[in-house]
Image: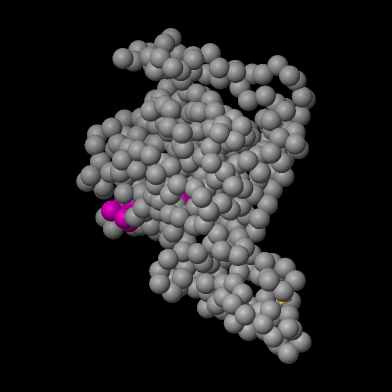
Amino acid sequence: MTQQDQFGFRNYDLPKEVERHQTATPQANYTDPKQFEQELDSVFESDWVMVGRVGMIPNPGDYFTAQVGTKPVIVMRQSDGSINAMGNFCLHRYACLLEGAGHTKRIVCPYHHWTYQMDGALIGVPDRVGFEKDALQGLKLVQLSCDTALGFIFVALCDDLDPVAERLGDLGDLIGNFGLANYEDRHVVHEEHWDGNWKLLIENFIESYHTTYTHTGSIGPTNPTNLAEFGPWGAPGFAIHSNSYREEDLPEIYNPNLTEDEKRRFYVISLFPNGLAAVDANFVWWMALEPTGVAQTNARWGLSYAPQTMADTADANAFCATIRDVIETATAEDKEMVQRVQKGASFGTQTPGFLHAPLELNIKEFNNYLAQKIAGEEASC
Ligand code: FES
Ligand SMILES: [Fe+2]
């Protein structure tokens, strides 16, 4: 049962287990270097970390580089079509092997030209007689766990985690009609630096309370705060809510599998710990966060498009350019607010702020996940 309050917000009956009055994340959690170290250790080095989309590396030899916590990694498409993640450092004297994104059938270290196959096997060492004969036999770059779900790639520094699809529980069913794994990955930005703690980007993305007020030049008018819908609540691996289009702004929909609700909704999802995705009938706006300091984050982000939309819209390139403009404006609006919170939080008060119920309760779910990881209640390595 929903009603509207005097501001036009939908007022939801919350599940019994959800406490309506919740406090916001304490300021120190965005500024404390010890807390940050703990998160690198208990979260980024102990769980699946989203790094990008499958379509970024369609062909054998395609690769991109990323950071899992502080660790540099290579993500590369193999000759059998699988995706491999490896430590991005040379086995000789540790030089970082690859930077950015590209294509290569051989990984050649720029320092002394040790050479590796796509799967990381060492196959070439200049002036080999200078090394002990057997010491270099069978060497391979450090192999990391790698998995895919919904078209996203995940890497883990542990090798004892449940598969990502299992971890995401019923999310695959909840948004199954969208066919997200098949969305075409047409736009990727590898580096977008924010002066904000990584958790601020998550918290900003997963609440729609700010939409009307922050996004005045982009999605605020079309997807206003008072059309946001809560839940479902309580999944351990993700948080989800939706923010609908106003009827007069409903875009043309080309995917015949969607229900009426799915046609108007813009699902906003956090794949804990560091993945974000806003999914609608025509496109997904995603981010994979890389913390680079307690108050600095790199967001690799992209836009992928529903195949039906790309096939049936009159001018797919023009459509993509329009969406990109809106999302770039939305990103700039979000960035300004995240950076304002980071600055405000440097005051260091011990009195926490407040969360709107239900529109900011996804932040509580995220904090619950973090608390669990830090307490070591989940498997970690
Ligand atoms: S560090 Fe790579 S070849 Fe020397
Ligand atoms: Fe936003």
Residue 204 visible to the viewer:
no
Choose top left, top right, bottom left or bottom right for residue 347. Answer: top right
Residue 238 visible to the viewer:
yes
- For the N terminus, the quadrant is top left
Q: Which residue is drawn at 76% across and 29% down?
A: 346
Provide residue 306's location: percent of width, then percent of height: 34, 51
Q: Which residue is drawn at 39% across and 44% down?
A: 166
Q: Which residue is drawn at 55% across and 17% down?
A: 22
In the shown orientation, is residue 29 left or right of residue 202? right
Q: Does the magenta stretch include residue 46?
A: no
Q: Give the range drawn in magenta.
A: 302-310
Image height check: is 272 above or below 28?
below
In the shown orientation, is residue 254 left or right of residue 133? left
Choose top left, top right, bottom left or bottom right for residue 34. Answer: top right
Provide residue 293's location: percent of width, then percent of height: 72, 45
Provide residue 93's location: percent of width, then percent of height: 75, 71
**Going by the picture, which residue comes out furthest to the front?**
134
Colouring mode (rainbow / by chain / secondary structure / one colour):
one colour
Provide residue 56's location: percent of width, then percent of height: 47, 61
Q: Which residue is drawn at 45% across and 25% down?
A: 225
